Image (cartoon, rainbow, N blue to C red):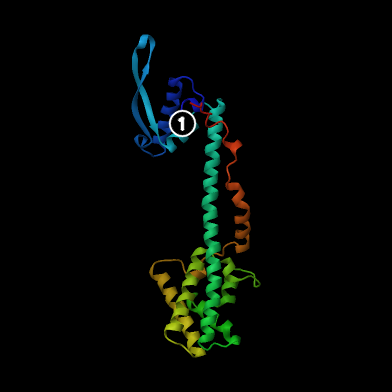
Amino acid sequence: MQPFLGYTQWRRFEDAIKRAITSCKQSGNEPSHHFAGVGKPIEGGKGAVQIVNDYHLSRFACYLIAQNGDPRKPEIANAQKYFAIQARRQEISDAIVADIERLELRKQTSEEFKALSGAAREAGVQDRMFGVFHDAGYKGMYGGLGRDAIKKLKRIPEKENLMDRMDTTELAANQFRMTQTRDKLTRERVKDQQSAIKTHESVGKEVRNAIKHIGGTLPEKLSPAEHIKQVENRVKITAPKMKLKEKDAKGLIGKQKEE
């Protein structure tokens, strides 16, 4: 790594290593896990062999050495830039993973809503009562609050779909409510409209009780998330930023001579 970072003298490079080891300690990490010291024989004048320190370095150690190197060296400056870009890429990666998870869960809840509507129809719920049926599930799960009351409480515009403003936690809880209601309607062969509505409310209450039991935040107390469309748009424009351009890492690794 010494020549790749522009150091021609070992002692200068070792100074950077020592500063990196100090930084490693100060960050609460164990240096021996990242800087494994070994002896390296080098030939001196008149054929004399001298043993000097050498190191097996982890990726974290390489990062610390670059951060503690001489920024006047182009190689060090480019290495610092490279690691900064990689850190930013990781931040973006973590954020986009969370966004994709929410998008996928929103898609699943949309599909489950349709499946539950089908099961409700099979159970005898008439089309004009679908609003009442679905509201019953919300009321059971949200402590008596129906869809419109939830939106009012969370200050969500009337025209917006409630589930488009749910975060992954709230979406997952509602998906569970819907899947369990659908299964219960089918399993118990419910064929009465009023019974189907009561079943949905009952399952909603059970989900609410489960959230209470494990110490979770009750759904009506969860803050509304940004609109799902904003998340979708962000995912579309974030992908290009994940690509590390060659010029951004230029100079970090020198060209190797062909043997």
Q: Is residue 30 rendered to the left or right of residue 118? A: left
Q: Secondary structure at mark 1?
A: helix
> Mark 1, residues whose alpha carbon is within 10 Å: few (<14), some, or many (≥20)?
many
Where residue 71 appears, as percent x and y from the top left, is 54, 28
**Quarter holding residue 135:** bottom right
Label 1, on which residue?
A: 65
Residue at position x 46%, y 19% from top?
9
| Lateral position of residue 248 relative to residue 137, left or right | right
State the image coordinates of residue 30 (x, y, percent, origin top left).
36, 37
Q: Which residue is rendered at x = 56% and y = 76% of the image?
A: 114
The foreground one among 246 and 128 is: 246
Q: Is residue 184 above or below residue 43?
A: below
Question: Seen in the image, is 239 located left or right of residue 195?
Answer: right
Regarding residue 144, the answer to whether it shows in the image is no
Q: How many marks?
A: 1
**Residue 229 shows up from this direction:** yes
Residue at the extreme front of the image, as rendered: 259
| Residue at the right extreme of this rendering | 159
Q: Is residue 229 above or below residue 25?
A: below
In the rendered view, tell whether residue 65 sits above or below residue 132. Answer: above
Q: Residue furthest bottom?
A: 192
**Is residue 250 found left or right of 195 in the rendered image?**
right
Q: Position of residue 245 (x, y in %)?
A: 60, 40
Give coordinates of residue 166: x percent, y percent: 55, 66
Which three-letter amino acid code belongs to the residue tagged 1? Ile
The image quadrant that residue 45 belongs to is top left
Front position in the image: 140 or 251: 251
Tell me what residue is drawn at x 61 percent, y 87 percent.
Answer: 128
